[in-house]
């Protein structure tokens, strides 16, 4: 496995949080290393906020809105 790649980790987290991909889906993609910015089996609102902050930092506000909507549905 190569060095940690924050961009890949955040994209993986985005798809996982929104339910677009499962961990199994990501594992099946053999051409890419698997990174997450948090434990993908146990994440919370604070973890989602980290991902929102990342996408806000690169000005991808559409992803921020989708993540915020998902964050608001969690307890």
Image (tube, helix red, strand yellow):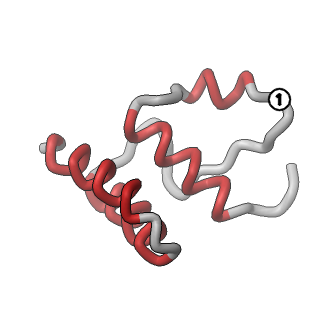
Question: SS for tag 1?
Answer: loop
Q: Position of residue 28 (x, y in %)?
A: 73, 22
**Which quadrant is the C terminus positioned in?**
top left
State left or right for residue 17 relative to residue 71: right
Structural crowding at the residue carrying mark 1, measured as other residues with C-alpha within 10 Å and reported as few (<14), some (14–19) or many (≥20): few
> Of residues 41 and 69, which is closer to you in this image?
69
> Of residues 2 and 25, which is closer to you in this image?
25
State left or right for residue 40 relative to residue 25: left
Q: Position of residue 34 (x, y in %)?
A: 71, 43
> Of residues 60 and 22, which is closer to you in this image?
60
> Of residues 65 and 28, which is closer to you in this image?
65
Residue at numbered disc 1: 30
Q: Residue at x 29, y 56 (%)?
A: 65
Residue 10 in sight: yes
- In the rendered view, tell whether residue 13 sits above or below residue 23: below
Residue 47 in sight: no
- In the rendered view, tell whether residue 53 sits above or below residue 64: below
Q: Residue at x 67, y 54 (%)?
A: 8
- In the rendered view, tell whether residue 65 sits above or below residue 58: above
Q: Position of residue 22 (x, y in %)?
A: 52, 26
Q: Residue at x 87, y 56 (%)?
A: 2
Number of marks present in the image shown: 1
State left or right for residue 47 relative to residue 16: left
Q: Residue at x 21, y 48 (%)?
A: 69
Dividing the picture into quadrants, the one containing residue 19 is top left
Dividing the picture into quadrants, the one containing residue 32 is top right
Q: Position of residue 1 (x, y in %)?
A: 86, 49
């Amino acid at each position: 496995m190569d060095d940690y790649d924050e961009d890949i980790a955040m994209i993986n987290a985005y798809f996982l949080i929104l339910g677009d991909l499962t961990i199994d889906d990501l594992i099946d993609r053999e051409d890419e290393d698997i990174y997450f910015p948090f434990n993908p089996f146990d994440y919370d609102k604070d973890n989602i906020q980290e991902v929102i902050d990342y996408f806000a930092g690169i000005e991808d506000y559409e992803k921020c809105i989708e993540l915020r909507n998902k964050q608001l549905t969690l307890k």
